[in-house]
Image (cartoon, rainbow, N blue to C red):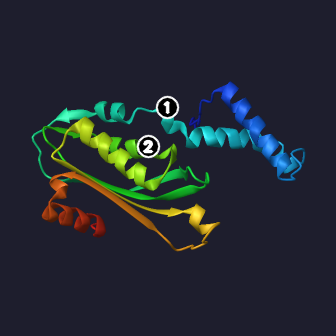
């Protein structure tokens, strides 16, 4: 028998307030919150929203600083196909996809797992893809002070697929670059690396 136990902490007062709002929303929508399937839905939805916005309580720069190491390496470091899940702040519907991130060290490297954690910290907030792209870039740039940073995000938005224009196959791509990645040759190398399957 496994000893693994998944635990999450929630602020009881916040959970109660949010759940109460969801209960009223269900009633307003004409649902019966007393039926079996909905009895615990307000509390579940409240905890879901607390988790999906938990990035507001995280310090992405601190995540990077927790695993920074002095190193003379000055070639491109690429972490690609980082899964991300976020909530569109306009409709509170998910958008999800992948982030591709590179930096060129300038005296410091960072533990590779910290880059996806930074993506999670910014993604778990009410977001728009454009700002998410820029926030990730600025955090890495200001914390590591590298020779350059590149961020590309490709995402599908349920606010376009489930409602509104209802285009199920649309994908939105955003990008941001600093330093050496503003040079055409460096940027092309990065795009080539994230477009190539090496495994």
In this picture, is 175 found above or below 74?
A: below
Between discs 1 and 2, the one toward the N terminus = 1
> Looking at the rendered structure, which numbered label has been put on residue 122?
2
Locate the N terminus and report the quarter of the image it occupies: top right
> Does residue 197 show up?
no
How packed is label 1: few (under 14 Cα within 10 Å), some, or many (20 or more)?
few
For label 2, the SS is helix
Q: Are marks 1 and 2 in contact (CB under 8 Å)?
A: no
- Which of these two is toward me, 69 or 185? 185
In this picture, is 64 found above or below 102?
A: above
> Looking at the rendered structure, which numbered label has been put on residue 30?
none
Q: Residue furthest left?
A: 72
Residue at 44% across, 43% down? 122
Question: Which image quadrant is residue 113 in?
Answer: top left
The CA span between labels 1 and 2 is 10 Å
Residue 70 screen position, x and y as percent: 15, 34
Residue 134 screen position, x and y as percent: 35, 49
**Lateral position of residue 18 relative to residue 57, left or right:** right
> Does residue 53 show up?
yes
For label 1, the SS is helix
Residue 112 screen position, x and y as percent: 30, 44
**Lateral position of residue 77 relative to residue 174, left or right:** left
- Which of these two is toward me, 41 or 182? 182
Residue 118 screen position, x and y as percent: 38, 42
Residue at 22% across, 62% down? 190
Locate the C terminus and report the quarter of the image it occupies: bottom left
Tally of numbered tags:
2
**Lateral position of residue 43 relative to residue 10, left or right:** right
Residue at 50% across, 72% down? 170
> Looking at the rendered structure, which numbered label has been put on residue 57?
1
**Lateral position of residue 171 relative to residue 65, left or right:** right
């Amino acid at each position: 028998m496994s000893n693994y136990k998944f635990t999450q902490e929630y602020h009881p007062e916040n959970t109660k307030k949010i759940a109460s709002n969801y209960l009223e929303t269900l009633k307003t929508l004409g649902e019966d919150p007393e039926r079996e399937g909905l009895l615990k839905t307000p509390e579940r939805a409240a905890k879901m929203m607390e988790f999906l916005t938990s990035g507001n309580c995280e310090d992405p720069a601190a995540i990077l600083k927790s695993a920074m190491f002095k190193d003379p390496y000055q070639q491109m470091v690429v972490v690609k196909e980082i899964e991300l899940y976020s909530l569109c702040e306009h409709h509170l519907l998910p958008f999800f996809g992948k982030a591709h991130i590179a930096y060129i060290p300038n005296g410091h490297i960072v533990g590779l797992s910290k880059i996806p954690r930074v993506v999670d910290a910014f993604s778990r907030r009410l977001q728009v893809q454009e700002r998410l792209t820029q926030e990730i870039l600025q955090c890495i740039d200001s914390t590591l002070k590298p020779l350059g940073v590149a961020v590309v995000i490709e995402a599908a938005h349920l606010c376009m697929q489930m409602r509104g224009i209802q285009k199920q196959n649309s994908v939105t791509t955003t990008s941001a670059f600093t330093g050496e990645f503003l040079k055409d040759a460096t940027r092309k190398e990065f795009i080539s690396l994230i477009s190539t399957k090496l495994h």
